[in-house]
Each structure stands twice: as C-alpha cells, then as structure tokens.
Image: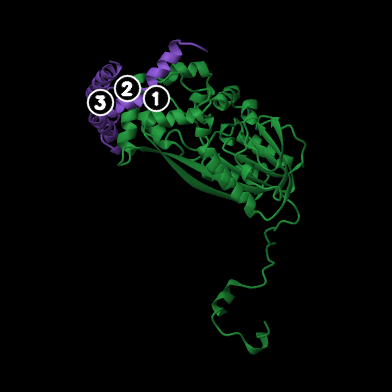
Chain colours: A green, B purple
Amino acid sequence: MMNISRRSPLFLLLLSSSSSGSCCGLQSGSRRLISGMKVFDRRMKRRQRSWSARQEDTELYDYLRDEVGSRLADRVHDVARTFPLALDVGGGKNHITQHLSKDVVERLFLTDVSEETLKRRRRGEIATHCVVADEEFLPFKENTFDLVVSSLSLHWTNDLPAALTQIQQVLKPDGVFIGAMVGGDSLYELRCSLQLAETEREGGFSPHVSPYTAVTDLGNLLSHAGFNMLTVDVDDVQVHYPGIFEVMMDLQGMAESNCAWNRRALLHRDTMLAAAAVYKEMYGNDDGSVPATFQILYMIGWKPHESQAKPAKRGSASTSFADLSKINKPIRKDDADL
Amino acid sequence: MSGSNVWTRTREKLRLFPEIFAQCGSEAAAYGKCVSATTTGGQELKKDLCAKEFQALKTCFTNAAKKRAK
C-alpha cells in the first residue's frame, strides 16, 4: 500500500481492485509527512460540508462534534486565563465556543472552508467574526491570537505539519493551541468489515476510511511545529448504531464522508451486504446493535515565551536523590523552623 | 436535482436495506462467522472463500426484498 498513493488517482481506481490484502492493520498508522502531497480533495470536503449544512435534519448529526466541542471547552476553562482574541480553525457550526463565556474569550474568529456551515452556526455570548478559510492557508498575520482551538477538522488537512506550523505562527508568544482531531484507530470496525467483505467478494480492497495520525506521532508533530509544554491525551467515544448502513449514513450526515483522492467511486451492493454481515458478526453487541469507535486525540501546545518554565540547566541540582532516604527520619532541631 | 431520477430511486431502495437485512439474521451470522474465521489465523481470506454462505444470504435478502415490495 505504501507506493500506491504516489500514483495518480485515476490509475489507482483501476489498480486497487486487483491488489490482494491481508487482514486489518494496513490502513492505520502515521500519516505520510511528505509536503506537497495531496491526500484529500479539499474542494470535495467543502462541498460535503455545505451539503450537510443544507439538510433539514442536520442537527441530528451534530452529536459527535457537540460532545468533543464541550470537552474542548472544558479544557479551555481549565486554563486560568482570559483570552482577548481567539481563533477557531475548522469551527463549523461553532461547537466549542458556544459553551464559553465572555469572561474567557472576548472576541472570536470562526473559520471553516464551507460558508453554508458558518451561516448555520450556533450563537453564543461571544462577539464572533466568520471567515471562510482553509485550515492550511490561514489568512491572519503572525502573533495575533491568544488562543487557537480546533475540533475535528485537522484530520482532513493534506499537510498537517504545515497547518500546525501556521497555527503556531498566528499565535502570540505565550498563546495556547487546544485541539482535538480524530486519530489512531478510529472506525476500525468499519474499516475492517469493509476490507474483509471486499476481499472475499471482489478479490481485493481499496481504502474507505482515511489515514489517521497515530497518537505517538502527534507529540513529534507538535514539537516540530514549535510548540512547548505539550499535552496529548486520547479519548474513545463509542457510538452504537443499528447497523453498518446507519454508521455510513451518519458519517455522511456529519460531513465526514471520505474525500481522499484514492477513494473508490462506488461500493457494490453485494459488498455492502457482505460488510453488514461481517460487521454484525465480528463486532455486534448482544442487543443487535453495532459499535463504532471514534478515537479522539486532544492536544495542548504553548507558543514559547520567556515566562514559561524551562528545564533546569545541567549541574544545577541542589539536592541529591540520595537524600530521599532521609525523608522518613525526623528533622534535626536546628532545621525545625518551618 | 429535483423530481424522481435514478439517484433518488436508488437512494429510496437503499433506505430499505437495514429493514430487509434484519430478516436474514441467521444467514448473515453464518457468512460473518465464515469470514471472521480467517482472521483468527485459519485460512487466508481469498475471493469467494465463503461464496456458499453469501449466496444463501443474498437469496434470503432478495426474497425478503420481493416480499417487502409487494
């Protein structure tokens, strides 16, 4: 699979159906960090988001974004600071800052690639300016923002290192980036079911679930982008659905459909039937429902500033580890003045 | 795209999928077991390895669809 993605998309459509595959595990793993490489069709992603926003029942599909948005807002609250100017990258319908108050963030810039989504945003207390902008081409000057947040949109960027670098640049020194993206083993049930079904029915398989960043790579990516004092943690959100069809319908409603260049244009009915059977058998719950796992990676990174704690210089230690053994002994009389 | 065209008709048919699929539980389970047996280190999964089970599932599915359409 490693060389296939360097070829042109049309060639891949013809080639992928004849490749043979071994079982699950090929799709996940770290994303290729080659700059200039187009994994995703950004125009398609914009069209998918606009389509999703225009649906009448679009609210029904917001549950995942709302959940992650509220957890991100908690993390913003945990930082004991007020942020005069904040930026929400790929903010969509304003899932994060609807939970924040004017005391925490004074002014907000909300960006997304899709204008339709921005039009249907939730209203909160904070004065918001909407900007239609791509995550990789932020139209802001350096050292502008005190806070940048991003929820569930960075996993569709073509060049994640560049996007993180841009975020780092638009931050002021001592500014913070708090983000969440889908990563790791998300949707492994769907990926494996489709892979097995396609192999059995058609003799080969092509990727249906996009490549995700592994949590171990995220720390490296953030420090290469120039962030300090990193915090990365993983949260699993497991949603139960009646079946594979509902999983795919909800993903489409959430504007999370595949938009990778190497995606296959169609899914055979037989393969879909086979995948439904495999999903239910391999991952089904006792009550007949099937789970879909979203592994959300949360990251916090600070732009360097002199006031931040730095590692101490070598040789500056004033106590030794050998003193640990003296902790249990009573303090001498001349030290008692504490 | 407004009105009835091949895409709207196909989507409507597709929406019935879960309901019809629910009626073929045992065939689906048999096919699923056959495929998932390959993941536990038995045979390697090849094309049409579980063709018999899949045919049973497909027949059940088409019959249920026909009954539903009546």
Judge from the rendering whether residue A198 lies leftward or rightward of residue A139; answer left or right. Answer: left
Q: Residue at x 38, y 34 (%)?
A: A24
Instruction: Provide the secondary structure element on which disc 2 rests.
Output: helix
Q: Are marks 1 and 2 on the same chain?
A: yes
Find the distance from the CA under tag 1 to the CA under tag 2: 9 Å
Can residue A83 be seen in the rendering of this structure? yes
Q: Are marks 1 and 2 in contact (CB under 8 Å)?
A: no
- Could you say which disc has been placed on residue A205 in the image? 1
Instruction: Provide the secondary structure element on which disc 3 rests.
Output: loop
Task: Locate residue B33: give its quadrant.
Answer: top left
Instruction: Provide the secondary structure element on which disc 1 rests.
Output: loop
Q: Position of residue A241 (x, y in %)?
A: 39, 36
Check the image and report above or below for A141 versus A260.
Answer: below
Check the image and report above or below for A223 versus A196.
Answer: below
Task: Locate residue A244: give its quadrant.
Answer: top left
Find the distance from the CA under tag 1 to the CA under tag 3: 16 Å
| Image mark 1: chain | A
The answer to which of A184 and A50 lies nearer the viewer is A50
Q: Are marks 3 and 2 in contact (CB under 8 Å)?
A: no
| Amino acid type, mark 1 | Phe
Crowding around mark 1 (Cα neighbors within 10 Å: few <14, some 14 to 19, many 20+) is many
The answer to which of B62 and B19 lies nearer the viewer is B19
Q: Residue at x 43, y 33 (%)?
A: A26
- Could you say which disc has been placed on residue B50 in the image? 3
Q: Position of residue A114 (x, y in %)?
A: 63, 27
The answer to which of A221 and A237 lies nearer the viewer is A237
Q: Where does label 2 land, which residue?
A: A201
Tell me how many marks there are: 3
Check the image and report above or below for B4 versus A219.
Answer: above
- Could you say which disc has been placed on residue A269 in the image? none
| Image mark 3: chain | B
